[in-house]
Amino acid sequence: MRTYNNLHDYQRFAIATGVNLKNVAYFLGTGLGKTAISLAVIDQLMKRKLIQNTLVVGTKKIIYNSWRQEAEEWKPLSHLSFSIIHGDAHGGSPESSRRRGFHANSHIKLINYEGLPWLAEYLQKMHYDNPRSKFPFQCIVYDESTKMKHSTTQRFRVFKKYMGLFPYRYILTGTPIPNGLMDLFGQMYVLDIGESLGTVLSNFRSKYFMIVGSIQDGSRKYIPFKTTKEVIQKRIKRKVIYMKKEDYVELPPIHYNPIKLDLPAKLRGQYEELERTFFLDLEGAEVEAFSAASLSMKLRQFLQGRMYTYGEEGKRSTIDIHTEKLDYLKELHEEIEGLGNCIIAYNFIFEREDLLSIFPNAPVIDGSAKDKEVSKAIQEWNKGQHPILLFNPASDPHGLNLQFGGNQILWYSLTYNLEHYVQLIDRVYRQLQKRNVFVHHLLFRNTLDEMIYGVLTQKDANQTQLLAALKQYKEKKGY
């Protein structure tokens, strides 16, 4: 087990800052130990008798697979006790399970973001919104705080009246502005209740952004003024610790490997016809895109070998087109006698079915997997019990440690979501990874595959650049 002697200097600094300032945003690159730092802050505050109970808010995967497991790795933190406020954590009905987690005699309560509306309602029923009652928590940690970037969501609005009741507040994320500076408003609000960037979203927008376009036609955009970034940085600087993992942790090399394939002539003709006309007749099955966004999705599906169609009653079915990528992957797997220690990332449900035809024993982590199945898959993967792990990045890879089970990721298909792309890679490329990391990408030449790959892999890419590149691609192709 590790002790405080194993802490890096930057971690000691981050812990001391958290204890002294009360409200700190840890914008730390993945793998820099945000969870360990936060647990140490909680431990030190408890030892100083400044807090007794802490609420940690995170995604379901985080609350089930990160916090308790991290504490068990550190001897000075192993005394901390945890309970999960979730519907299936303690047996019985969902309501009784959540109540048992809430009332458990534990130092740290863990709840997922989707559970905040329930918690707000329950706190009100228990009269904790009464000024005379004693609020049950003294500290709150928002893990992957981008989940609170939108102040208009239900979870934000219903929990808002309780945010200021926590004397100690911390937010954690390695990707604080995946879509631009606008993402900071909600996150900084839950941290300091509006002290840095104000309390009203419309005021924040008008102060720091130029408003163009109309809400009615969907063209409304908020473009930051030239001075916005500098001004916002100054306003939040005192409360933010920002670190990139490359500057503080010695990591093995990472290699990005584009594997480029050629579409056979017939498929190339069909792809370009769909791209040009928004329509494709596949032996009687007609595929039509009604917008540029819809066309992009259908082109991606085409490249992966199947396409979704919808009948008159909205029933979805798939059209089989080709197996080019699947055949290549099968050959690759057989040639090297097993594509081992590899996470294969996919995006469409039909891809999962195709991949399982090659890797029938591989565990799957996606939106349909139950929490216990995900926990079991992660544990077995990290113990080296599975050479292949299938992962849909849309199921949210935030907060997972996957570096012990392998050192390769293969993107069977790419995602438009830059945050999901970066987060999944960083689950493997992080502290305690001992081997060189390889990130493979199966790409068809001169298609959307190459465009998306080019933007995703450029240094310091952001979601705005990705969308801009997609727009340029569409304009070049005439749609």
Image: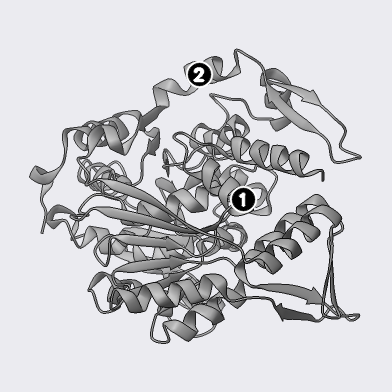
Q: Is residue 364 above or below residue 186?
A: below
User: Where does the image place residue 427, in percent across and percent down from the top left?
Assistant: 36, 56
**Residue at x-position 23% and y-position 31%:** 13
Instruction: State the residue at coordinates (60%, 17%).
Output: 228
Amino acid at the residue labelled 2: Arg
Tell me where residue 237 appears, x and y as whole percent: 43, 21
Q: Is residue 375 in view from this perspective?
A: no
> In the displayed structure, would residue 164 be above or below residue 228?
below
In this rendering, position of residue 267 left or right of residue 280: left
Name the N-terminal-most of marks 2 and 1: 2
- Check disc 1 and report its element: helix, strand or loop: loop
Q: Is residue 17 above or below residue 440?
A: above
For the point 90% across and 40% down, which residue is it?
217
In the shown orientation, is residue 450 left or right of residue 473?
A: left
Depth check: 206 or 322 in front? 322
Tag 2's secondary structure? helix
Residue 459 or residue 277, whichever sits in front? 277
Q: Quadrant of residue 201?
A: top right
Task: State the residue position of label 1.
Answer: 446
Q: Which mark is residue 235?
A: 2
Circle 2 or circle 1, nearest the eye: 1
Residue found farthest to the front: 265
Mark 2 neighbour class, 10 Å CA radius: few under 14, some 14 to 19, many 20 or more? few
